[in-house]
Image (cartoon, helix red, strand yellow):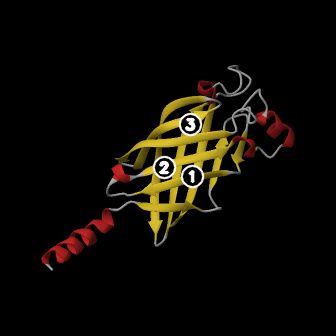
């Protein structure tokens, strides 16, 4: 009887520290912009397990369909998907996989590997996390140099730095 009671006390006390799995809501957005172009990626998926009190148990991975780029201009979309830029046929996905998390004064930072156009780089992405009931929101704002991933040519005609804004709305699984 004492063992059973001790198990339940340990189990119940550990519940708040368990990581929570989330499902990405359709209302989520991933957008990009620079001085030359802006738009969204319309198709992405991911796995999110997050625990604010035990970040080592957290993990995130995302897969964005490169062909889902939408600049609001059909010709520009076609060009962005071509071999000159994202080469969506050869490199259909942009992928991110976390390696670790840390708490910051402004929220959190996630470290991981970002792969685009066949090139993988270590990145850190600052984000905020807010939750209300069974719902949560991650907001991330960061920049990526497209030339680091061999996307497009390195020239003065198109800015190299892309600002990424992601608002990921979540529902507990």
- Write the residue at 46% across / 53% down: 128
**Which residue is painted at 26% across and 69% down in the image?**
11
Q: Secondary structure at mark 2?
A: strand
> In the displayed image of the protein, which residue is found farthest to the right?
75
- The residue singled out by tag 2 in the image is 60
Residue at 69 percent of width and 51 percent of height: 43
Q: Earlier in the sequence, mark 2 or mark 1?
A: 1
In this rendering, which labeled residue sits more in front, label 3 or label 1? 1
Mark 3 or mark 2: which is in front?
2
* Mark sitting earlier along the chain (3/1): 1
Q: Is residue 172 above or below residue 61?
A: below
Front one among 39 and 51: 51
- Label 3 to label 2, Cα distance in Å? 19 Å
Whole-percent x, y for residue 91 in the image: 69, 34
Left or right position of 77 against 7 = right
Residue 72 disc label: none
Q: Residues within 10 Å of mark 2 (few under 14, many from 20)?
A: many
**Depicted 170 relative to depicted 66: above or below:** below
Q: CA distance from mark 2 to mark 1?
A: 7 Å
Upstream in the sequence, badge 3 or badge 2? 2
User: Is the Cβ of the residue at disc 2 closer than 8 Å to that at disc 1?
Assistant: yes
User: Which structural element holds mark 3?
Assistant: strand
In front of the other: 82 or 1: 1
User: Which quadrant holds the N terminus?
Assistant: bottom left
Q: Nearer the viewer, residue 48 or 142?
A: 48
Q: Is residue 78 left or right of residue 157?
A: right
Residue 143, which numbered label?
3
How packed mark 1 is, by other alpha carbons closer than 10 Å (few <14, some 14-19, many 20 or more), is some
Q: Circle 1 is placed at which residue position?
A: 46
In screen coordinates, is 37 left or right of 123? right
Asked if the residues shown at circle 3 and circle 1 are in contact, with their CB atoms under 8 angstroms apart, the answer is: no
Q: Position of residue 79 (x, y in %)?
A: 81, 33
């Amino acid at each position: 009887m004492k063992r059973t009671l001790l198990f339940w006390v340990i189990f119940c006390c550990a519940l708040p520290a368990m990581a929570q799995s989330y499902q990405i809501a359709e209302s989520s957005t991933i957008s990009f912009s620079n001085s030359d172009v802006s738009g969204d990626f319309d198709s992405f998926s991911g796995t999110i397990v997050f625990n604010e009190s035990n970040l080592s148990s957290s993990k995130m991975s995302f897969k964005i369909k490169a062909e889902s780029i939408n600049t609001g201009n059909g010709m520009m979309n076609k060009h962005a998907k071509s071999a000159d830029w994202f080469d969506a046929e050869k490199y259909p996905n942009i992928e991110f996989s976390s390696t670790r998390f840390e708490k910051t004064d402004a929220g959190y930072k996630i470290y991981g590997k970002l792969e685009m156009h066949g090139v993988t780089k270590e990145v850190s992405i600052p984000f905020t996390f807010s939750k209300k009931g069974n719902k949560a929101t991650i907001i991330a704002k960061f920049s990526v140099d497209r030339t680091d991933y061999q996307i497009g040519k390195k020239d003065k005609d198109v800015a190299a730095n892309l600002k990424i804004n992601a608002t990921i709305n979540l529902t507990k699984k």
